[in-house]
């Protein structure tokens, strides 16, 4: 077969066979170069990006690399320096030798792992990679002339990226996995980790100047720049695919609860979406973000907007807590309101976001892009092992009928690359985005930026995007909805929501009193026998705990320590009625500790002299209370200025009367 090679030395053609080892190709490429350092030779199926070091492919035959007759390979390399002049083309072998070894043969096993082979993707990616994603069609009564078992052009399954299918089903973008199949059709048939995955089809978009310059001919930007290291001109275009197709709220109550803040104060509200990704069957190879909870971080809300306290100090804790769920959860996006009551009819919300204004403002789009950059998606189809992001942005605002409605978006890959290269900023006009000026003092290089549109005569026009361009060029629209049969992971929404000081407060007292109401301190191990009453009690307690906001508050108190894991796992289980569900929780020290404090904090118990725990019939809490009483005596005898909290054992150094951590009296 004929293989074409393009490098800075020109275009070359080689006659090779499918079974030739990559080292044969390497030898031929090296012959065309001017004093190349063999280890620096990089190949790619595209002019920029996706480069693979040629020497790492040794041991693979050309067929297994996916090379076909007529393929064009782009080659880049560095010239030998005195240091590298002695190095051999293939350090592991004495000389490149033609070998017909298949990918599974010895040398390949020793080849360094390519990063995209080793990344762990989301389970939803495993799901789609295991399927061909073809769109099945029934027998067409008009055109199919064959029997029920036959198949013809009219009823043959369609590829997952079939354009007419998407158009006829009003699907605006093809899904991420359909996009991968379109770029690399053989990916669906090749065994994972071999052949087709050698050169992954995706390369993250980058508009940054390459440093150091691959040509090696000048000092890094901003000291110098050339065609090899500068980003090429950008033409903004609608993104054909989307990383997430649909946003599903696991329960209607989620949005209602979120809106209570706005209803109660008239100020806008922000939240992080806690959820997971699932296949979305309405779109070929589609993915949906399923939102299970909305966590509201500290924020300053105003009727005309809001500001966040970033970086959010609880970010890591909340992500870790979410990951403990029986279905691991993470932060899948952001949600915010933009609601203005109609002055003539306060039950209506103004229709502010429409084709004549904007859907997502320039500022919001840039913020979404920044968050997407912080939340990259692991990808086996990308040369870096990561590609774009599944982080979604949901806006709650008035629709055309002036009802409160939900809209879901993502910033495009181009938007993220422009934000990463620091080349755009919000404009005073929210429907516009500004291209920043080039500034060498902050190493900002801005190439030409264009966007295309149809002018008033219907003619396709390419226009410079400097200084401003419409924000819609950076936005991808998603659909949203609610499940027909909701089965939310969190079954309770009774506990107050965090950071809503003006409406409701999360306090240790609220936690303890709701635990007491559920008779939590009386719930015992299932091995001690279960009457129907016991079962009822356990289910009630499990339901109480199955509340994201309660779990997040309990975790933040620190009483449970690592034992919070058992609580979260039980509280997010498929069935909360399972009688043995709570056994793993009841045995933990953290839970015993919590129950002791809960019992102790009861209004009646508080007035009783501490240490005499005779009022309790629970042996465990009695022991702990005695222990606490001893520690308390010890602490005061020592005359230390720090006071140990009798409830949670936190060392308080302040002069107040209540514990800093659990808020209970220090005694
Ligand atoms: Zn047919
Ligand atoms: Zn350069
Ligand atoms: Zn305390």
Image (spheres, helix red, strand yellow):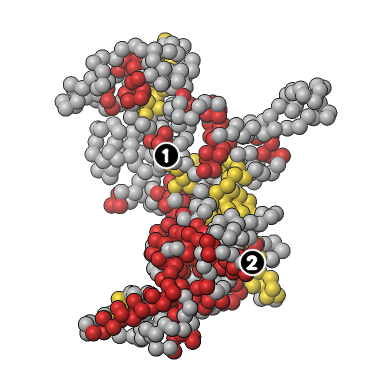
Secondary structure of the residue carrying numbered label 1: loop
Specify few, some or many for label 2: CA neighbours under 10 Å numbering under 14, 14-19, or 20 or more. Answer: few
Q: Vertical placement of 654 versus 440: above or below?
A: below
Q: Point out which mark residue 119 bears.
A: 1
**Numbered mark located on residue 532 in the image:** 2
Left or right? Give the position of 217 relative to 627: left
- Residue 259 % position (x, y): 60, 69
Q: Decide if ligand 2 comes within 8 Å of the CB at mark 1.
A: no
Residue at the location (46% across, 11% down)?
1
Nearer-the-camera pick, 305 or 299: 299
- Disc 1 to disc 2, C-alpha distance: 49 Å
554 above or below 283?
Answer: below
Residue drawn at 43 percent across, 83 percent down: 614
Q: State yes or no: discs 1 and 2 in contact (Cβ < 8 Å).
A: no
In the rendered image, the quadrant that contains the C terminus is bottom left
Task: Kindly identify the residue that appears in the image at 46 percent across and 45 percent down.
Answer: 377
Can you give x and y, in whole percent of width and height, for residue 524 in the image? 51, 67
Asked if the residue at label 2 sits under 8 Å from ligand 3, the reply is: no
Taking the spot 54% from the left edge, 43% from the top edge, the residue there is: 124
First in sequence: mark 1 vs mark 2: 1
């Amino acid at each position: 077969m004929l293989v074409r090679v393009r490098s800075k030395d020109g275009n070359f053609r080689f006659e090779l066979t499918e079974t030739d080892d990559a080292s044969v190709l390497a030898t031929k490429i090296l012959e065309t170069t001017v004093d190349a350092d063999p280890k620096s030779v990089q190949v790619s199926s595209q002019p920029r990006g996706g480069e693979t070091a040629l020497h790492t492919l040794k041991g693979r035959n050309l067929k297994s690399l996916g090379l076909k007759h007529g393929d064009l390979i782009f080659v880049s390399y560095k010239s030998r320096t005195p240091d590298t002049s002695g190095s051999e083309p293939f350090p592991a072998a004495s000389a490149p030798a033609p070998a017909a070894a298949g990918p599974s043969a010895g040398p390949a096993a020793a080849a360094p792992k390519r990063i995209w082979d080793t990344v762990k993707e989301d389970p939803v990616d495993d799901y789609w990679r295991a399927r061909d994603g073809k769109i099945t069609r029934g027998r067409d009564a008009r055109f199919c002339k064959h029997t029920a078992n036959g198949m013809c052009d009219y009823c043959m399954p369609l590829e997952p990226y079939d354009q007419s299918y998407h158009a006829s089903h009003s699907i605006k973008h093809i899904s991420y996995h359909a996009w991968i199949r379109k770029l690399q059709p053989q990916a669906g048939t090749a065994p994972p980790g071999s052949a087709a995955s050698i050169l992954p089809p995706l390369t993250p978009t980058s508009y940054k100047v390459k440093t150091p310059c691959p040509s090696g001919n000048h000092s890094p930007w901003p000291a110098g720049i050339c065609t090899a290291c500068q980003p090429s001109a950008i033409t903004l275009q609608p993104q054909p695919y989307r990383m997430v197709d649909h946003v599903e709220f696991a329960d209607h109550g989620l949005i209602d609860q979120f809106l209570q803040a706005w209803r109660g104060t008239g100020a806008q509200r922000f939240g992080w979406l806690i959820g997971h990704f699932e296949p979305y069957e309405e779109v070929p190879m589609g993915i949906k973000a399923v939102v299970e909870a909305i966590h509201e971080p500290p924020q300053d809300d105003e009727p005309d907007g809001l500001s966040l306290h970033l970086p959010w100090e609880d970010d890591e804790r909340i992500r870790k807590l979410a990951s403990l769920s029986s279905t691991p959860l993470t932060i899948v996006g952001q949600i915010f309101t933009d609601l203005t009551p109609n002055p003539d009819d306060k039950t209506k919300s103004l229709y502010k976001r429409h084709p004549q204004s904007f859907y997502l403002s320039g500022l919001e789009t840039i913020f979404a892009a920044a968050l997407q950059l912080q939340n990259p998606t692991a990808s086996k189809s990308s040369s870096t092992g990561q590609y774009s992001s599944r982080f979604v942005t949901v806006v709650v605002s008035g629709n055309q009928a002036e009802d409160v409605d939900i809209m879901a978006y993502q910033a495009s890959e181009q938007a993220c690359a422009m934000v990463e290269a620091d080349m755009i900023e919000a404009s005073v006009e929210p429907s516009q985005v500004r291209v920043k000026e080039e500034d060498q003092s902050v190493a900002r290089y801005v190439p030409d930026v264009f966007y295309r549109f149809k002018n008033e005569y219907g003619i396709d026009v390419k226009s410079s995007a400097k200084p401003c361009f419409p924000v819609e060029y950076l936005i991808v629209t998603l659909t949203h909805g609610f499940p027909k049969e909701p089965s939310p992971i969190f079954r309770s929404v009774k506990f107050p929501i965090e950071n809503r000081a003006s409406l409701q407060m999360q306090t240790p007292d609220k936690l303890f009193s709701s635990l007491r109401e559920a008779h939590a301190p009386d719930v015992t191990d299932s091995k001690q026998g279960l009457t129907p009453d016991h079962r009822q009690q356990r289910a009630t307690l499990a339901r109480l705990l199955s509340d994201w906001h309660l779990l997040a508050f309990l975790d933040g108190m620190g009483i449970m320590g690592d034992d919070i894991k058992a609580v979260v796992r039980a509280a997010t289980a498929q069935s909360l009625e399972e009688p043995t569900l709570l056994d793993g929780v009841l045995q933990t020290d953290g839970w015993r500790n919590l129950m002791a404090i809960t019992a102790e904090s009861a209004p009646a118990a508080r007035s009783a002299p501490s240490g005499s725990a005779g009022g309790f019939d629970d042996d465990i809490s009695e022991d702990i209370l005695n222990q606490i009483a001893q520690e308390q005596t010890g602490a005061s005898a020592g005359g230390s200025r720090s006071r140990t909290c009798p409830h949670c054992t936190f060392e308080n150094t302040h002069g107040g009367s209540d514990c800093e951590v659990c808020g209970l009296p220090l005694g």
